[in-house]
Amino acid sequence: MEAKPSGSQRQGTSIQGMGTETTIQDALAASEIKAANELTRRWLTGRSEVPAVASGLGVWPLLAALATGAVDETRDELLAAAGLDADQAATVPAALLEAVRTSPSIRLALAVWAGARVTLDPEWSAKLPIESVGSLTGDVAADKAALDAWASRNTGGLIERMPLDFNQPIDLVLASALSIRTTWSTPFQDSSRTFKGPWAQFGRCRALTATLNGDVLRVADNASVLTVPGDGDIDVLLALGREELAPQAVMNELVDAATDPAWGRSSTELGLGERAVGVEVTEYQSMRPQSGPEVEVQTVRFKLDADLDLSDDAEALGLVIASDVDRARFDRLAAEPVYVTQAKQTAMAVFSASGFEAAAVTAIAMTRAAAFAKPKHRHVRASIRFDRPFAYLARHRPSGLVLIAGWVEKPERP
Protein backbone atom coordinates (compact mmCIF):
# COMPACT_ATOMS: atom_id res chain seq x y z
CA MET A 1 0.00 0.00 0.00
CA GLU A 2 1.29 3.47 -0.87
CA ALA A 3 2.27 5.63 2.04
CA LYS A 4 1.50 8.83 0.15
CA PRO A 5 -1.85 10.48 0.93
CA SER A 6 -4.61 10.01 -1.59
CA GLY A 7 -8.23 11.07 -1.81
CA SER A 8 -10.03 11.25 1.50
CA GLN A 9 -6.83 10.43 3.40
CA ARG A 10 -5.51 13.83 2.34
CA GLN A 11 -8.50 15.76 3.63
CA GLY A 12 -7.71 17.82 6.69
CA THR A 13 -3.97 17.24 6.44
CA SER A 14 -1.53 20.11 6.21
CA ILE A 15 0.88 20.20 3.30
CA GLN A 16 3.24 22.30 5.40
CA GLY A 17 3.71 21.76 9.07
CA MET A 18 6.25 21.46 11.85
CA GLY A 19 8.67 23.52 9.73
CA THR A 20 8.80 20.96 6.92
CA GLU A 21 7.62 21.34 3.34
CA THR A 22 5.88 18.68 1.30
CA THR A 23 7.12 18.20 -2.25
CA ILE A 24 5.10 17.18 -5.29
CA GLN A 25 6.14 13.55 -4.92
CA ASP A 26 5.00 13.64 -1.28
CA ALA A 27 1.71 15.40 -1.97
CA LEU A 28 0.62 13.17 -4.86
CA ALA A 29 0.48 9.40 -4.90
CA ALA A 30 2.42 7.62 -7.63
CA SER A 31 -0.90 6.63 -9.22
CA GLU A 32 -1.96 10.30 -9.34
CA ILE A 33 1.27 11.40 -11.01
CA LYS A 34 0.82 8.56 -13.49
CA ALA A 35 -2.77 9.70 -14.14
CA ALA A 36 -1.62 13.25 -14.95
CA ASN A 37 1.13 11.96 -17.24
CA GLU A 38 -1.23 9.58 -19.03
CA LEU A 39 -3.62 12.47 -19.69
CA THR A 40 -0.73 14.29 -21.39
CA ARG A 41 0.14 11.19 -23.43
CA ARG A 42 -3.45 10.44 -24.50
CA TRP A 43 -4.16 14.05 -25.41
CA LEU A 44 -1.03 14.81 -27.43
CA THR A 45 -0.71 11.45 -29.20
CA GLY A 46 -4.42 11.37 -30.02
CA ARG A 47 -4.39 14.64 -31.98
CA SER A 48 -4.06 14.72 -35.77
CA GLU A 49 -1.03 16.97 -35.23
CA VAL A 50 1.15 17.18 -32.12
CA PRO A 51 1.01 20.85 -30.98
CA ALA A 52 4.12 22.99 -30.77
CA VAL A 53 3.56 23.34 -27.03
CA ALA A 54 0.85 22.18 -24.65
CA SER A 55 0.36 21.31 -20.98
CA GLY A 56 -1.72 18.38 -19.84
CA LEU A 57 -0.93 19.44 -16.27
CA GLY A 58 -2.72 22.71 -16.96
CA VAL A 59 -5.89 20.80 -17.85
CA TRP A 60 -5.73 18.05 -15.20
CA PRO A 61 -6.70 19.98 -12.02
CA LEU A 62 -9.50 21.74 -13.91
CA LEU A 63 -11.02 18.39 -14.86
CA ALA A 64 -10.79 17.35 -11.21
CA ALA A 65 -12.54 20.56 -10.08
CA LEU A 66 -15.28 20.09 -12.69
CA ALA A 67 -15.76 16.47 -11.64
CA THR A 68 -16.44 17.44 -8.02
CA GLY A 69 -19.32 19.62 -9.23
CA ALA A 70 -20.72 17.06 -11.67
CA VAL A 71 -23.05 14.09 -11.21
CA ASP A 72 -23.90 10.88 -13.02
CA GLU A 73 -22.35 10.29 -16.46
CA THR A 74 -20.89 13.83 -16.60
CA ARG A 75 -18.86 13.13 -13.47
CA ASP A 76 -17.91 9.63 -14.61
CA GLU A 77 -16.48 10.88 -17.90
CA LEU A 78 -14.47 13.65 -16.22
CA LEU A 79 -13.07 11.29 -13.57
CA ALA A 80 -12.08 8.74 -16.21
CA ALA A 81 -10.24 11.39 -18.23
CA ALA A 82 -8.45 12.70 -15.12
CA GLY A 83 -7.63 9.15 -13.96
CA LEU A 84 -8.94 9.90 -10.46
CA ASP A 85 -11.65 8.68 -8.14
CA ALA A 86 -14.14 11.09 -6.55
CA ASP A 87 -12.16 11.51 -3.31
CA GLN A 88 -8.94 12.22 -5.17
CA ALA A 89 -10.63 14.75 -7.45
CA ALA A 90 -11.82 16.66 -4.39
CA THR A 91 -8.34 17.03 -2.91
CA VAL A 92 -5.76 16.85 -5.72
CA PRO A 93 -6.03 20.51 -6.90
CA ALA A 94 -5.31 21.97 -3.46
CA ALA A 95 -2.59 19.40 -2.72
CA LEU A 96 -0.89 20.11 -6.04
CA LEU A 97 -1.02 23.87 -5.51
CA GLU A 98 0.48 23.69 -2.04
CA ALA A 99 3.24 21.32 -3.11
CA VAL A 100 4.22 23.41 -6.12
CA ARG A 101 4.75 26.40 -3.82
CA THR A 102 7.88 24.65 -2.52
CA SER A 103 9.40 24.48 -6.02
CA PRO A 104 11.72 27.32 -7.04
CA SER A 105 11.13 26.63 -10.74
CA ILE A 106 7.39 25.92 -11.04
CA ARG A 107 4.46 28.28 -10.50
CA LEU A 108 0.85 27.11 -10.62
CA ALA A 109 -2.34 29.01 -9.90
CA LEU A 110 -6.01 28.04 -10.14
CA ALA A 111 -8.97 30.38 -10.14
CA VAL A 112 -12.73 30.48 -10.62
CA TRP A 113 -14.83 33.49 -11.59
CA ALA A 114 -18.64 33.44 -11.41
CA GLY A 115 -21.16 35.88 -12.86
CA ALA A 116 -24.42 37.06 -11.34
CA ARG A 117 -26.48 34.63 -13.42
CA VAL A 118 -25.16 31.57 -11.55
CA THR A 119 -25.15 30.67 -7.87
CA LEU A 120 -22.21 28.49 -6.92
CA ASP A 121 -22.83 25.58 -4.59
CA PRO A 122 -21.08 26.66 -1.36
CA GLU A 123 -19.93 23.09 -0.66
CA TRP A 124 -18.25 22.92 -4.07
CA SER A 125 -16.58 26.32 -3.81
CA ALA A 126 -15.43 25.56 -0.24
CA LYS A 127 -13.33 22.67 -1.57
CA LEU A 128 -11.50 24.92 -4.03
CA PRO A 129 -8.05 26.25 -3.09
CA ILE A 130 -8.22 29.35 -0.88
CA GLU A 131 -8.63 32.73 -2.62
CA SER A 132 -9.51 31.10 -5.92
CA VAL A 133 -13.04 32.47 -6.40
CA GLY A 134 -13.69 35.82 -8.08
CA SER A 135 -16.57 37.60 -9.79
CA LEU A 136 -17.52 38.37 -13.37
CA THR A 137 -19.17 41.79 -13.69
CA GLY A 138 -20.83 41.25 -17.06
CA ASP A 139 -18.80 44.15 -18.51
CA VAL A 140 -16.89 42.40 -21.31
CA ALA A 141 -13.98 44.85 -21.39
CA ALA A 142 -13.58 44.92 -17.61
CA ASP A 143 -13.82 41.14 -17.23
CA LYS A 144 -11.32 40.56 -20.04
CA ALA A 145 -8.88 43.05 -18.53
CA ALA A 146 -9.15 41.43 -15.08
CA LEU A 147 -8.66 37.89 -16.36
CA ASP A 148 -5.85 38.92 -18.71
CA ALA A 149 -4.10 40.56 -15.76
CA TRP A 150 -4.47 37.35 -13.73
CA ALA A 151 -2.94 35.31 -16.55
CA SER A 152 0.03 37.68 -16.88
CA ARG A 153 0.59 37.95 -13.13
CA ASN A 154 0.56 34.21 -12.58
CA THR A 155 2.92 33.39 -15.47
CA GLY A 156 5.41 36.15 -14.70
CA GLY A 157 4.41 37.97 -17.89
CA LEU A 158 5.09 35.00 -20.17
CA ILE A 159 1.41 34.89 -21.21
CA GLU A 160 -0.54 38.12 -21.18
CA ARG A 161 -4.07 37.06 -22.03
CA MET A 162 -6.78 34.63 -21.08
CA PRO A 163 -7.51 32.35 -24.08
CA LEU A 164 -11.27 32.95 -24.21
CA ASP A 165 -13.67 34.69 -26.57
CA PHE A 166 -15.31 37.22 -24.26
CA ASN A 167 -17.81 38.15 -26.95
CA GLN A 168 -19.55 34.85 -26.29
CA PRO A 169 -21.82 34.53 -23.25
CA ILE A 170 -19.82 33.46 -20.19
CA ASP A 171 -21.28 32.83 -16.73
CA LEU A 172 -18.42 30.90 -15.12
CA VAL A 173 -14.68 30.52 -15.78
CA LEU A 174 -12.25 27.95 -14.36
CA ALA A 175 -8.61 28.60 -15.19
CA SER A 176 -5.09 27.44 -14.45
CA ALA A 177 -1.79 29.24 -15.02
CA LEU A 178 1.45 27.25 -15.11
CA SER A 179 4.97 28.53 -15.64
CA ILE A 180 8.38 26.86 -15.55
CA ARG A 181 11.82 28.44 -15.50
CA THR A 182 15.11 26.59 -15.25
CA THR A 183 18.79 27.30 -15.97
CA TRP A 184 20.96 24.59 -17.50
CA SER A 185 23.53 22.89 -15.30
CA THR A 186 25.82 22.99 -18.36
CA PRO A 187 25.12 25.97 -20.66
CA PHE A 188 25.07 25.57 -24.43
CA GLN A 189 27.11 27.56 -26.94
CA ASP A 190 24.93 29.67 -29.23
CA SER A 191 25.92 29.69 -32.91
CA SER A 192 24.57 29.81 -36.46
CA ARG A 193 24.67 26.91 -38.90
CA THR A 194 22.97 25.28 -41.85
CA PHE A 195 21.52 21.77 -41.84
CA LYS A 196 21.25 18.97 -44.33
CA GLY A 197 18.06 16.99 -44.83
CA PRO A 198 14.58 18.32 -43.91
CA TRP A 199 15.90 21.56 -42.42
CA ALA A 200 18.18 22.50 -45.33
CA GLN A 201 15.39 24.71 -46.73
CA PHE A 202 15.65 27.11 -43.77
CA GLY A 203 19.22 28.23 -44.48
CA ARG A 204 21.21 29.43 -41.46
CA CYS A 205 19.53 28.61 -38.13
CA ARG A 206 20.24 29.26 -34.47
CA ALA A 207 22.13 26.18 -33.30
CA LEU A 208 23.14 25.14 -29.78
CA THR A 209 26.07 22.89 -28.87
CA ALA A 210 27.34 21.46 -25.58
CA THR A 211 29.12 18.49 -24.10
CA LEU A 212 27.08 17.10 -21.22
CA ASN A 213 28.71 14.96 -18.57
CA GLY A 214 26.77 12.05 -17.12
CA ASP A 215 24.50 9.26 -18.25
CA VAL A 216 21.99 11.56 -19.96
CA LEU A 217 21.34 9.81 -23.29
CA ARG A 218 19.20 6.70 -23.74
CA VAL A 219 18.52 4.87 -26.97
CA ALA A 220 15.94 2.39 -28.24
CA ASP A 221 14.97 0.96 -31.61
CA ASN A 222 12.56 3.77 -32.49
CA ALA A 223 14.00 6.83 -30.73
CA SER A 224 16.86 8.40 -28.80
CA VAL A 225 16.11 10.59 -25.78
CA LEU A 226 18.45 13.20 -24.28
CA THR A 227 17.91 14.56 -20.76
CA VAL A 228 19.13 18.15 -20.28
CA PRO A 229 19.35 18.80 -16.52
CA GLY A 230 18.30 22.19 -15.18
CA ASP A 231 18.21 23.73 -11.74
CA GLY A 232 15.22 23.65 -9.44
CA ASP A 233 14.59 19.94 -10.06
CA ILE A 234 13.61 20.46 -13.71
CA ASP A 235 14.71 18.26 -16.63
CA VAL A 236 13.97 18.95 -20.29
CA LEU A 237 13.92 15.85 -22.47
CA LEU A 238 14.43 15.89 -26.25
CA ALA A 239 13.40 12.88 -28.35
CA LEU A 240 14.55 12.15 -31.90
CA GLY A 241 12.58 9.39 -33.63
CA ARG A 242 13.28 7.33 -36.72
CA GLU A 243 12.69 9.46 -39.80
CA GLU A 244 9.60 7.51 -40.90
CA LEU A 245 8.03 7.64 -37.42
CA ALA A 246 4.96 9.89 -37.01
CA PRO A 247 5.20 12.75 -34.47
CA GLN A 248 2.54 11.09 -32.31
CA ALA A 249 4.67 7.93 -32.08
CA VAL A 250 7.77 9.96 -31.18
CA MET A 251 5.82 11.72 -28.44
CA ASN A 252 4.64 8.36 -27.14
CA GLU A 253 8.25 7.15 -26.94
CA LEU A 254 9.23 10.37 -25.15
CA VAL A 255 6.55 10.02 -22.47
CA ASP A 256 7.62 6.40 -21.99
CA ALA A 257 11.24 7.47 -21.58
CA ALA A 258 10.27 10.26 -19.17
CA THR A 259 8.15 8.05 -16.94
CA ASP A 260 9.80 4.60 -17.14
CA PRO A 261 13.42 4.26 -15.92
CA ALA A 262 13.64 0.92 -17.76
CA TRP A 263 12.97 2.51 -21.18
CA GLY A 264 15.71 1.83 -23.73
CA ARG A 265 19.36 1.50 -22.74
CA SER A 266 22.15 3.86 -21.87
CA SER A 267 24.29 5.20 -24.70
CA THR A 268 27.27 4.06 -22.60
CA GLU A 269 26.37 0.51 -23.65
CA LEU A 270 27.05 1.34 -27.31
CA GLY A 271 30.46 0.30 -28.61
CA LEU A 272 32.85 2.41 -30.63
CA GLY A 273 31.40 2.89 -34.11
CA GLU A 274 27.89 1.78 -33.10
CA ARG A 275 24.86 3.86 -34.06
CA ALA A 276 21.37 4.48 -32.80
CA VAL A 277 18.68 6.94 -33.97
CA GLY A 278 20.65 10.15 -34.57
CA VAL A 279 23.51 8.83 -32.43
CA GLU A 280 27.01 7.61 -33.20
CA VAL A 281 29.89 6.71 -30.89
CA THR A 282 33.31 8.15 -31.71
CA GLU A 283 36.58 8.82 -29.93
CA TYR A 284 38.91 11.79 -29.67
CA GLN A 285 42.21 12.70 -28.00
CA SER A 286 42.47 14.78 -24.83
CA MET A 287 45.17 15.80 -22.39
CA ARG A 288 42.99 14.74 -19.45
CA PRO A 289 41.63 11.31 -18.60
CA GLN A 290 37.92 10.70 -19.03
CA SER A 291 36.09 10.75 -15.69
CA GLY A 292 32.61 9.65 -16.81
CA PRO A 293 30.16 9.49 -19.70
CA GLU A 294 30.26 12.36 -22.18
CA VAL A 295 27.54 13.30 -24.64
CA GLU A 296 28.20 15.81 -27.39
CA VAL A 297 24.93 17.57 -28.24
CA GLN A 298 23.94 19.60 -31.28
CA THR A 299 20.43 20.94 -31.21
CA VAL A 300 18.57 24.15 -32.00
CA ARG A 301 17.20 27.06 -30.08
CA PHE A 302 13.40 27.18 -30.28
CA LYS A 303 10.72 29.67 -29.34
CA LEU A 304 7.22 28.25 -29.75
CA ASP A 305 3.65 29.18 -28.96
CA ALA A 306 0.27 27.61 -29.53
CA ASP A 307 -3.40 28.43 -29.11
CA LEU A 308 -5.43 25.25 -28.69
CA ASP A 309 -9.17 24.74 -28.76
CA LEU A 310 -9.68 21.88 -26.32
CA SER A 311 -13.16 21.20 -27.63
CA ASP A 312 -11.35 19.57 -30.57
CA ASP A 313 -10.03 17.06 -28.02
CA ALA A 314 -13.23 16.67 -26.02
CA GLU A 315 -13.14 12.87 -26.04
CA ALA A 316 -9.55 12.62 -24.78
CA LEU A 317 -10.17 15.26 -22.11
CA GLY A 318 -13.52 13.98 -20.86
CA LEU A 319 -15.49 17.01 -22.06
CA VAL A 320 -17.97 15.41 -24.46
CA ILE A 321 -20.92 15.19 -22.06
CA ALA A 322 -19.83 18.29 -20.12
CA SER A 323 -20.15 20.30 -23.36
CA ASP A 324 -23.57 18.93 -24.29
CA VAL A 325 -26.33 21.37 -23.38
CA ASP A 326 -28.85 18.54 -23.04
CA ARG A 327 -26.70 16.02 -21.12
CA ALA A 328 -24.32 18.04 -18.95
CA ARG A 329 -25.12 17.75 -15.23
CA PHE A 330 -23.25 19.99 -12.81
CA ASP A 331 -25.80 19.81 -9.99
CA ARG A 332 -23.10 20.05 -7.30
CA LEU A 333 -21.41 23.06 -8.88
CA ALA A 334 -24.19 25.59 -9.38
CA ALA A 335 -27.87 25.96 -8.60
CA GLU A 336 -28.59 26.69 -12.27
CA PRO A 337 -27.93 24.20 -15.10
CA VAL A 338 -24.59 25.02 -16.76
CA TYR A 339 -22.45 23.40 -19.41
CA VAL A 340 -19.00 23.93 -20.96
CA THR A 341 -19.08 26.33 -23.91
CA GLN A 342 -15.36 27.07 -24.31
CA ALA A 343 -12.22 25.13 -23.36
CA LYS A 344 -8.94 26.66 -24.54
CA GLN A 345 -5.24 26.80 -23.80
CA THR A 346 -2.51 29.19 -24.84
CA ALA A 347 1.06 28.09 -24.23
CA MET A 348 4.66 29.06 -25.02
CA ALA A 349 8.12 27.55 -24.63
CA VAL A 350 11.67 28.83 -25.16
CA PHE A 351 14.74 26.56 -25.27
CA SER A 352 17.89 28.71 -25.27
CA ALA A 353 21.61 28.45 -24.56
CA SER A 354 21.14 29.32 -20.89
CA GLY A 355 17.92 27.53 -19.98
CA PHE A 356 14.26 26.77 -20.60
CA GLU A 357 11.08 28.66 -19.81
CA ALA A 358 7.51 27.78 -20.62
CA ALA A 359 3.99 28.70 -19.60
CA ALA A 360 0.41 27.64 -20.23
CA VAL A 361 -2.90 29.26 -19.35
CA THR A 362 -5.91 26.95 -19.60
CA ALA A 363 -9.47 28.23 -19.34
CA ILE A 364 -12.85 26.52 -19.29
CA ALA A 365 -15.90 28.75 -19.72
CA MET A 366 -19.40 27.66 -18.74
CA THR A 367 -22.78 29.11 -19.56
CA ARG A 368 -26.30 28.71 -18.21
CA ALA A 369 -27.83 25.92 -20.23
CA ALA A 370 -31.28 27.47 -20.55
CA ALA A 371 -30.11 30.64 -22.21
CA PHE A 372 -27.99 29.68 -25.20
CA ALA A 373 -27.80 27.16 -28.01
CA LYS A 374 -25.35 24.29 -28.06
CA PRO A 375 -21.97 25.36 -29.54
CA LYS A 376 -20.18 23.60 -32.38
CA HIS A 377 -17.22 21.29 -31.45
CA ARG A 378 -14.46 21.23 -33.40
CA HIS A 379 36.03 10.88 -24.84
CA VAL A 380 34.40 7.75 -25.90
CA ARG A 381 31.31 9.68 -26.28
CA ALA A 382 27.97 9.53 -27.92
CA SER A 383 26.87 12.45 -30.04
CA ILE A 384 23.34 13.31 -31.07
CA ARG A 385 22.17 15.84 -33.64
CA PHE A 386 18.65 17.18 -33.51
CA ASP A 387 18.74 18.25 -37.16
CA ARG A 388 15.13 17.51 -38.06
CA PRO A 389 11.75 17.73 -36.29
CA PHE A 390 11.71 16.32 -32.76
CA ALA A 391 9.64 16.12 -29.58
CA TYR A 392 10.39 17.63 -26.19
CA LEU A 393 8.94 17.80 -22.69
CA ALA A 394 9.77 19.26 -19.29
CA ARG A 395 9.30 17.25 -16.12
CA HIS A 396 9.69 17.66 -12.39
CA ARG A 397 12.73 15.47 -11.82
CA PRO A 398 12.01 13.95 -8.36
CA SER A 399 8.36 13.07 -9.01
CA GLY A 400 8.47 12.41 -12.76
CA LEU A 401 5.46 14.71 -13.29
CA VAL A 402 5.33 15.92 -16.90
CA LEU A 403 4.80 19.69 -16.92
CA ILE A 404 4.73 20.69 -20.58
CA ALA A 405 5.49 19.07 -23.93
CA GLY A 406 5.45 19.70 -27.66
CA TRP A 407 6.93 19.28 -31.13
CA VAL A 408 9.70 21.29 -32.81
CA GLU A 409 8.78 21.40 -36.49
CA LYS A 410 11.48 23.86 -37.58
CA PRO A 411 14.47 25.65 -36.03
CA GLU A 412 14.63 29.29 -35.06
CA ARG A 413 16.39 31.51 -37.59
CA PRO A 414 18.74 34.41 -36.73
Image (spheres, rainbow, N blue to C red):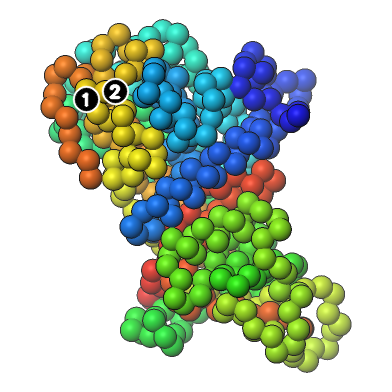
On screen, 353 above or below 181? below
Q: What distance separates the C-alpha of mark 2 from that of mark 1?
A: 6 Å
CB of mark 2 within 8 Å of CB of mark 1? yes
Q: Position of residue 220 (x, y in %)?
A: 63, 70
Q: Residue furthest bottom?
A: 285
Q: Position of residue 182 (x, y in %)?
A: 58, 53
Q: Label 1 is placed on what type of residue?
A: Val
On screen, 318 above or below 260? above
Secondary structure under the numbered disc 2 in the rendered image: loop
Where is residue 140, by image quadrant? top left
Q: Nearer the viewer, residue 100 or 317?
A: 317
On screen, 239 above or below 307? below
Q: Nearer the viewer, residue 353 or 377?
A: 377
313 sits left or right of 62 in the view: left
Q: Check disc 1: other Cα within 10 Å, few if <14, some if 14-19, many if 20+.
A: many
Classify the position of the N terminus by image quarter. top right
294 sits left or right of 338 in the view: right
Residue of label 1: 325
Q: Position of residue 294 (x, y in %)?
A: 73, 75
Q: Label 2 is placed on what type of residue?
A: Ala
- Give the residue at x 52% y 34%: 83
- Residue 47: which disc? none
Q: Residue furthest front?
A: 73
Q: Position of residue 320 (x, y in %)?
A: 31, 34
- Give the residue at x 14% y 19%: 371
Residue of label 2: 328
